Image: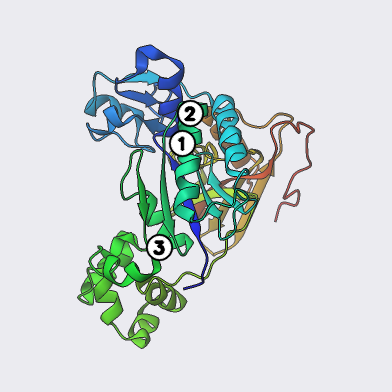
């Protein structure tokens, strides 16, 4: 263990909770923060809506089908950013080592805290109390010796909970957990581990490191360390997002004119991810890879940053028109990105990130 004291703060159903706080008529009701429409996705769902299976990043039409009585509220991101800044001001009373992950969560290194509180648990309690009393919102917190464990802990007693993992408790806490609780273990990696007979963190511990490295390369070492509760990553304050992107490799190569559905789907993913940032992305990037593995990028920095998923999608589709390789050309991959993130107060236009057409 590193000897650090890390707190992970995660606001509960943040966007939906802000809406319920500011409109008493929404309290206790299933609230879905999303625009209505065939291509809209859920930005957030209140816990009342989550009981019906509604989740963020879900298609809005699916959410409406799961919870017909849901109240749809269009997102108000400037207001959410304001509340996020207010939470950061509370954090700064206790430490300057703050690493925001999004508008609604952050890591805090409180190995030494400004308030001279005796324990990290006391710091977490004070922060949660201030958020409740001053912002009329709730937050869950995890306290642990490192970032990996603190993030697991903050989810342990959600919503409005606090969970502490002491250094001496790690060896009892981790082994029974499903392997999917380890960062980087999605469906594909989980299945590959299952093929090795690995279903719990304890099973990962039992594997030889050489086996993990043989199967997963450098990520095998990371899995080994996490299974033993080892995470040497420090809290890095104010690490700004440079870009957000999503890409898709097609099962069969497509003509350019057949890529619209993929562009729309990828733009939705990028837009949903960008809404968690305090800063605003200004440059839209379209990436393509030809069937001959030639990479192309087209980008545009409009005078005003995209203010909706529809605008982002429209720009990405317009960038497609700047690709002139002939009607017989086929493409194996396409990606959509949003870059050049800046503070919303800075509105001067920037030049293209990738002016060359390569």
Spatial CA span between label 1 and label 3? 32 Å
Q: How crowded is mark 1: few (under 14 residues within 10 Å), some or many (20 or more)?
A: some
Q: Which residue is drawn at 69% across and 32% down?
A: 344
Q: Which colour scheme is used?
A: rainbow
Which residue is label 1 attached to? 129
Q: Which of 80 and 70 is in front in this view?
A: 80
How many numbered discs, if any? Answer: 3
Quadrant placement of the C terminus: bottom right
Q: Nearer the viewer, residue 122 or 21?
A: 122
240 sits left or right of 332 in the view: right
Q: Residue furthest left?
A: 197
Evaluate if marks 1 and 2 touch, with contact meaning CB atoms under 8 Å apart: yes
Q: Residue at x 24, y 75 (%)?
A: 203
Q: Which residue is drawn at 46% across and 73% down?
A: 1
Q: 19 above or below 163?
A: above
Q: Residues within 10 Å of mark 3 (few under 14, many from 20)?
A: few
Does the rendering let one see residue 62? Answer: no
Residue 182 appears at what percent x and percent y?
A: 36, 63
Choose the circle earlier in sequence order: 1 or 3: 1
Give the label on residue 184, or none: 3
Q: Which structural element holds mark 3?
A: loop
Residue 202 appears at what percent x and percent y?
A: 25, 73
Give the label on residue 133, or none: 2
Residue 207 appears at what percent x and percent y?
A: 28, 82
Choose the circle earlier in sequence order: 2 or 3: 2
Does the rendering let one see residue 343? Answer: yes
Residue 262 appears at what percent x and percent y?
A: 44, 43
Q: Which of 230 and 65 is in front in this view?
A: 230
């Amino acid at each position: 263990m590193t000897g650090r004291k890390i707190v992970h703060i995660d606001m509960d159903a943040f966007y939906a909770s802000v809406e319920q706080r500011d409109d008493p008529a929404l309290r206790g009701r299933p609230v879905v923060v999303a625009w209505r429409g065939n291509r809209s996705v859920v930005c957030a769902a209140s816990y009342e809506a989550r009981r019906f299976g509604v989740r963020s990043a879900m298609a809005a039409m699916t959410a409406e089908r799961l919870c017909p009585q849901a109240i749809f509220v269009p997102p108000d991101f400037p207001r959410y950013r304001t509340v996020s800044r207010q939470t950061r001001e509370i954090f700064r009373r206790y430490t300057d080592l703050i690493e925001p992950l999004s508008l609604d969560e952050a890591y805090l290194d409180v190995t030494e805290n400004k308030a001279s509180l005796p324990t990290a648990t006391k710091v977490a309690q004070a922060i949660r109390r201030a958020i409740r009393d001053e912002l009329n919102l709730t937050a869950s917190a995890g306290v642990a010796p490192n970032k990996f464990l603190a993030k697991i802990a903050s989810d342990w007693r959600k919503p409005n909970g606090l969970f502490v993992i002491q250094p001496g408790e790690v060896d009892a806490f981790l082994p029974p957990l499903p392997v999917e609780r380890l960062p980087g273990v999605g469906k594909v990696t989980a299945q590959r581990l299952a093929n090795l007979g690995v279903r719990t963190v304890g099973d990962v511990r039992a594997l030889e490191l050489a086996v993990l490295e043989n199967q997963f390369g450098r990520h095998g070492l990371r899995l080994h360390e996490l299974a033993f509760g080892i995470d040497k990553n420090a809290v890095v304050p104010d690490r700004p997002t440079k870009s957000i992107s999503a890409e898709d490799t097609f099962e069969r190569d497509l003509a350019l004119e057949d890529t619209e559905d993929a562009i729309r789907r990828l733009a939705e993913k990028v837009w949903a991810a960008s809404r968690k940032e305090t800063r605003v992305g200004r440059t839209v990037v379209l990436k393509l890879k030809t069937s001959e593995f030639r990479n192309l990028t087209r980008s545009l920095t409009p005078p005003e940053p995209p203010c909706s998923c529809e605008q982002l999608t429209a720009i990405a589709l317009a960038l497609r028109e700047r690709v002139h390789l002939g009607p017989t050309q086929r493409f194996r991959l396409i990606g959509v990105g949003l870059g050049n993130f800046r503070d919303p107060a800075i509105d001067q236009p920037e030049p293209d990130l990738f002016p060359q057409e390569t």
